[in-house]
Image: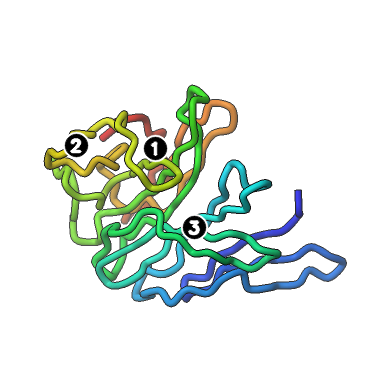
Amino acid sequence: GSRRLFLTQKTGAVRIVLPGTTPTLTTFYTFAPYTSSECGVLSVCFDPNYITNKYVYIFYTASASEQRIVRLTDNNNVGTNLANIVTGLPTAGANHDGGATGISSDQNGQGWYLYWSIGDNGNGSGVDANMTSLASKCGRARLDGSVPNDNPFFDGTGPNNDYIWARGLRNPFSFSFQPGSEKLWIYNVGTSYETVFQVNRGDH
């Protein structure tokens, strides 16, 4: 209800457009991301209890080989108390990094979960039956970054990456949850055409 607009700039800044007769722009937080090709600061989303805890989640490329989801606390339009939520997310430092983040209930209203999407890193990483990599995947975690043991490929000490929620994505650059149903719709960038998928638990 604050009428503010948060936006990300891939080169590092998270900005806020403040409302007013003449809207003004202020800097919420500045990262030092890796920005080659499609890498950088890629998305922002808000905790469902933001009104009380002021938590803001950011997906960004930390280096040529790692992406992260971090949490900041909104302290009067300034991001403070940076905390790593999910680290070690794959990138090849070029394209098909994905970078979408969002928070939704489990479709039964039983809890809140953090989702993200990552592409095939431009080189086919993580495709088809490769369940060890989060490349070419949609991931799902609790809001503190821990792994829900009801994720579809959870096998504990087995070889699978337990965060995997769905797979087979080329470059899932953005997504949205349908209000009411909480169905996940992913926009997947193609070469000569684009695709939009309704993605369910364990889909390929």
How many marks can you see? Answer: 3
The numbered dot on residue 197 is 1
Helix, strand or loop at label 2? It is loop
The correct choice, above or below, for 142 with respect to 58 in the image is: above
The correct choice, above or below, for 54 with respect to 8 in the image is: above
Instruction: Give the percent coordinates (x, y) of residue 11.
Output: 47, 76
Tell which circle, 2 or 3, labels the residue nearer the N-terminal end.
Answer: 3
Check disc 1 and give the amino acid type: Phe
Front position among marks 3 and 1: 3
Check disc 2 and give the amino acid type: Gly
Question: Which residue has dot 2 on it?
Answer: 156
The numbered dot on residue 182 is none
Front position among marks 2 and 1: 2
At a point 38% along the width and 44% down the height, the residue shown is 195
Tell which circle, 2 or 1, labels the residue nearer the N-terminal end.
Answer: 2
At a point 49% along the width and 64% down the height, the residue shown is 82
Camera-nearest residue between 109 and 95: 109
Q: CA distance from mark 2 to mark 3?
A: 25 Å
Question: Which residue has dot 3 on it?
Answer: 71
At a point 32% along the width and 40% down the height, the residue shown is 147
Q: Quadrant of residue 153?
A: top left
In the picture, which quadrant includes the C terminus? top left
Helix, strand or loop at label 3? It is strand
* Side (left or right) of 155 relative to 50: left
Check disc 3 and give the amino acid type: Arg
Asked if marks 2 and 1 touch (Cβ < 8 Å), the reply is no
